[in-house]
Amino acid sequence: MWVVDDLDQLVTLVRKAADESLYVRWSRGPQADLTDERQASQSSRDALTGTELPGLSANPLAVESWWGDRSLRLWIARRLYDYCHLRDLRGPGVRPWVLLGEQIGRGPDNEPLVICQRPLAWVSEAALSQAHRAVEEQASHEWGPLHRAD
């Protein structure tokens, strides 16, 4: 699978896919998440209850209309940064990847549950570092990753 080498490459990918539903997912990748061709096999698990969820939990990269003409780069940086704690929480091999998908529901944390139509790219460590820097440059003392323990 292609690797997004820097944040600007991901911005370009999102711009080109304006009418498609792109998502970022933190996991061990498509080889672990897409076990076969049946959509029913694509599932996540609720960490609190252990309940199997009907789809892969992921976050949309599409920009909301209320964002206006603000920086697409910052929007995407935040989407990556919000869940960066998952690689530590879920162990070795967990990293972000981008997929084209269809939302089929919402999980218990109100996250989109999607069916992956096609894996597109891994997100490199360099792109993650750039995302982290872009968010940190906002200098907000009231904001950070969406990790419950923080």
Image: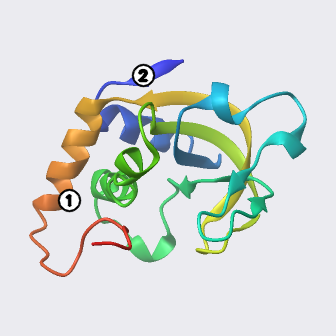
Residue at left 77%, top 58%? 52
When the figure is inspected, residue 8 is found, relative to residue 88, above or below; the finding is above
* Most foreground residue, 146 or 78: 146
Residue at left 31%, top 65%? 145
Left or right, 89 with reference to 135? right
- Residue 105 is tagged as none
When the figure is inspected, residue 56 is found, relative to residue 10, above or below; the finding is below
Q: Which residue is mark 2?
A: 3
The x and y percentages for residue 56 are 68, 50
Q: Are marks 2 and 1 in contact (CB under 8 Å)?
A: no
Name the element at disc 1. Answer: helix
* Most foreground residue, 63 or 127: 127
The x and y percentages for residue 48 are 60, 70
The x and y percentages for residue 95 are 43, 37
Residue at left 28%, top 32%? 125
The x and y percentages for residue 104 are 79, 60
Q: CA distance from mark 2 to mark 1?
A: 22 Å
- Residue 135 is tagged as 1
Mark 1 nearby-residue class (10 Å; few <14, some 14–19, many ≥20): many
Q: In the rendered view of the protein, which quadrant contains the C terminus?
A: bottom left
Amino acid found under the numbered disc labelled 2: Val
* Most foreground residue, 4 or 128: 128
